[in-house]
């Protein structure tokens, strides 16, 4: 019931002249269920001796869901600069094809979902590196369970 009131309040405020969607509206958007928002890009990093299972989902509204194997998911809204940088990297992203799993152990598997395609790689192509590094940086910055 509280969520409904918050949404109604934000909607009412946004209908006033001169009021724009800023941080309070984005904070409400971060609390809404993920099924209502469109995914811009998703990164999943799995494997290695450390047993990574990290996920970053960035939505088109500028908010993100960040999770690690060791704790709960965290919802945060990115800054305009972070979103602009990410969108710039995504313009140059070439997904290509999934890569076969190499023999041995301690390999990290990176999976990117973007524009209806999902591709997994064990080595990062040149166009993947900026996207992966940026999303990992956001995960390190914002993932801090309460």
Image: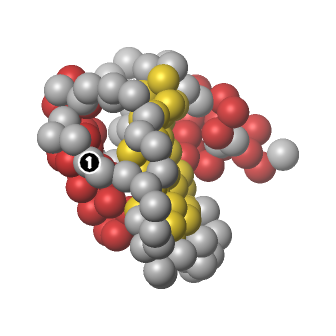
Residue named by callout 1: 124
Asked whether the viewer can see residue 14, the reply is no
Label 1: how many Cα within 10 Å (few below 14, some 14–19, many 20+): few
Residue 109 percent coordinates (x, y): 45, 55
Residue 22 percent coordinates (x, y): 36, 39
**Which residue occupies the foreground of this view, 101 or 47?**
101
Quarter assignment of residue 72: bottom right
| Dot 1: element | loop
Quarter assignment of residue 106: bottom left
Compared to residue 121, the image places residue 117 above or below, namely above
Colour pattern of the rendering? secondary structure
Residue 15 percent coordinates (x, y): 50, 19
Q: Residue furthest toward the front?
A: 103
Q: Quadrant of the C terminus?
A: bottom right
**Which residue occupies the foreground of this view, 99 or 59?**
99
Asked whether the viewer can see residue 113, the reply is yes
Quarter assignment of residue 80: top left
Q: Is residue 1 left or right of residue 142?
A: right
What residue is drawn where x is 32% and y is 60%? 136
What residue is drawn where x is 48% and y is 23%? 117
What residue is drawn where x is 17% and y is 26%? 92
Residue 2 percent coordinates (x, y): 77, 49
What residue is drawn where x is 84% and y is 46%? 1
């Amino acid at each position: 019931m509280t969520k409904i009131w918050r949404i109604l309040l934000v909607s009412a405020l946004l209908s006033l002249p001169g009021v724009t969607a800023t941080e309070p509206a984005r904070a409400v958007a971060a609390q809404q269920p993920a099924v209502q928002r469109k995914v811009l890009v998703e990164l999943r990093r799995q494997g290695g001796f450390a047993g990574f299972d990290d996920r970053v989902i960035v939505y088109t509204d500028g908010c993100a869901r960040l999770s690690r194997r060791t704790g709960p998911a965290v919802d945060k809204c990115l800054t305009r600069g972070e979103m602009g940088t990410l969108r710039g990297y995504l313009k140059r992203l070439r997904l290509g094809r999934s890569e076969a799993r190499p023999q041995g152990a301690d390999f990290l598997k990176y999976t990117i979902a973007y524009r209806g395609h999902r591709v997994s790689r064990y080595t990062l192509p040149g166009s993947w590196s900026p996207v992966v590094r940026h999303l990992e940086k956001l995960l390190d910055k914002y993932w801090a369970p309460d």
